[in-house]
Image (tube, rainbow, N blue to C red):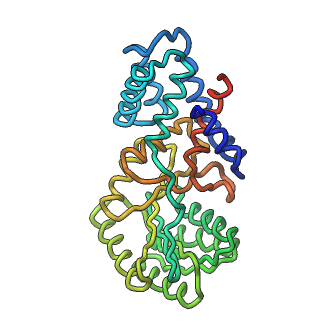
């Protein structure tokens, strides 16, 4: 069974097929169109073809390092497996991308002995506070008891914004005061969570990159204090990246990874970019799994990331030509 058939089979069992397809529409159009353009005049996998493939991958925001790996792998397999037709090369390309991403990881590393603490990190403007709210809604839909901590105490707007969301979603919000030590807010939130048997506590933290040393100290302290309150906390640290910033997002991620133990990525605004290849670059260059993906403006448009659904959404137009 070819990779396209496997992806089709995996995708057809998904509940959120339509959301994936509509959210990845821009990326799909751009990527599939450019790959199909390579078919015109295709004769063999030679230096010219590989150079054109490299350009398509770079335009999809896959990044030079990851794109080179993919191109090299396609060239090697085309020779080894004596691939001749463009359809075989297309399948080979998707197979290489699928293997490069690797296995799907568990959604959340749960704390089986009490509250699971999740810290949200990322630069201001990446959609961190809104994503915290969307995650809250998602966990609530699964019947979980959720509380949030407005620990971005450097922006009064962020505290108010999360409090409004919490009210709307009917969850408790532990609010810091503007200018207060964010770690103090998290301590209060952990104590509330323990007292009220909360399943998930999501902490929305500040995202200032201007002074890396301050950021590091702040995040280290947050880790320390939540770990003292709840064993093993934080159980997850999710970095929120805006997909439309492309390779800049990877640079941001590296700074946060130096500052704290990031365990996964939430990629927002995927519906707003035609450069969906950033997912593959994140996995390859940062070694981090993409946990959730923002496929639209609505609260329910934050979906658990699924590599097969993502690749199907990206390449659906190619499959219709087999």
* Residue 125 can be seen, yes or no: no
Camera-nearest residue between 161 and 293:
293
In the rendering, at what x and y percent does residue 168 appear?
Answer: 70, 71
Q: Quadrant of the N terminus?
A: top right
* Left or right of 141 in this view: 243: left
The relative height of residue 276 versus residue 209 in the rendered view (above or below) is: above
Camera-nearest residue between 172 and 163:
172
The residue at the point 59 percent across, 27 percent down is 32
* Left or right of 152 in this view: 131: right
In the rendering, at what x and y percent does residue 31 appear?
Answer: 56, 29
Number of numbered labels in the structure image:
0
Q: Quadrant of the C terminus?
A: top right
The residue at the point 43 percent across, 22 percent down is 78
In the rendering, at what x and y percent does residue 15 appear?
Answer: 72, 52
Residue extending furthest left?
A: 213
Camera-nearest residue between 232 and 5:
5
In the rendering, at what x and y percent does residue 268 appear?
Answer: 55, 51
The relative height of residue 154 versus residue 46 in the rendered view (above or below) is: below
The relative height of residue 243 versus residue 42 in the rendered view (above or below) is: below
Residue extending furthest bottom?
A: 195
* Residue 57 can be seen, yes or no: yes
The residue at the point 62 percent across, 35 percent down is 26
The relative height of residue 111 versus residue 240 in the rendered view (above or below) is: below
The residue at the point 38 percent across, 75 percent down is 222
Residue 10 figure quarter: top right
């Amino acid at each position: 069974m070819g990779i396209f058939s496997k992806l089709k089979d995996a995708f057809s069992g998904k509940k959120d097929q339509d959301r994936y397809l509509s959210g990845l529409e821009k990326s799909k159009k751009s990527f599939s169109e450019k790959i199909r353009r390579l078919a015109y005049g295709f004769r063999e996998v030679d230096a010219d073809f590989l150079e054109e493939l490299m350009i398509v991958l770079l335009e999809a925001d896959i990044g030079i390092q990851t794109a080179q790996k993919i191109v090299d792998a396609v060239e090697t397999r085309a020779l080894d497996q004596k691939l001749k037709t463009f359809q075989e090369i297309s399948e080979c390309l998707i197979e290489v991308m699928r293997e490069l991403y690797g296995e799907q990881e568990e959604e959340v590393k749960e704390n089986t002995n009490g509250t699971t603490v999740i810290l949200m990190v990322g630069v201001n403007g990446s959609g961190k506070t809104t994503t915290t709210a969307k995650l809250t809604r998602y966990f609530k839909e699964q019947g979980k008891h959720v509380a949030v901590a407005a620990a971005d105490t450097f922006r009064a707007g962020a505290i108010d914004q999360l409090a409004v969301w919490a009210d709307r979603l009917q969850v408790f919000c532990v609010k810091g005061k503007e200018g207060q030590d964010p770690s103090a807010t998290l301590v209060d939130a952990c104590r509330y969570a323990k007292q009220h048997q909360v399943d998930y506590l999501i902490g929305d933290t500040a995202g200032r990159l201007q002074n890396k040393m301050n950021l590091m100290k702040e995040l280290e302290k947050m880790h320390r204090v939540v770990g003292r309150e709840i064993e093993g906390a934080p159980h997850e640290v999710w970095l929120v990246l805006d997909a439309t910033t492309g390779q800049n997002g990877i640079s941001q991620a590296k700074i946060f990874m130096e500052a704290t133990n990031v365990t996964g990525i939430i990629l927002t605004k995927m519906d707003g970019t035609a450069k969906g290849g950033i997912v593959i670059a994140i996995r390859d260059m940062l070694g981090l799994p993409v946990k959730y993906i923002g496929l639209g403006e609505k609260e329910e448009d934050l979906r658990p990331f699924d590599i097969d659904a993502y690749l199907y959404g990206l390449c659906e137009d190619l499959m219709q030509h087999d």
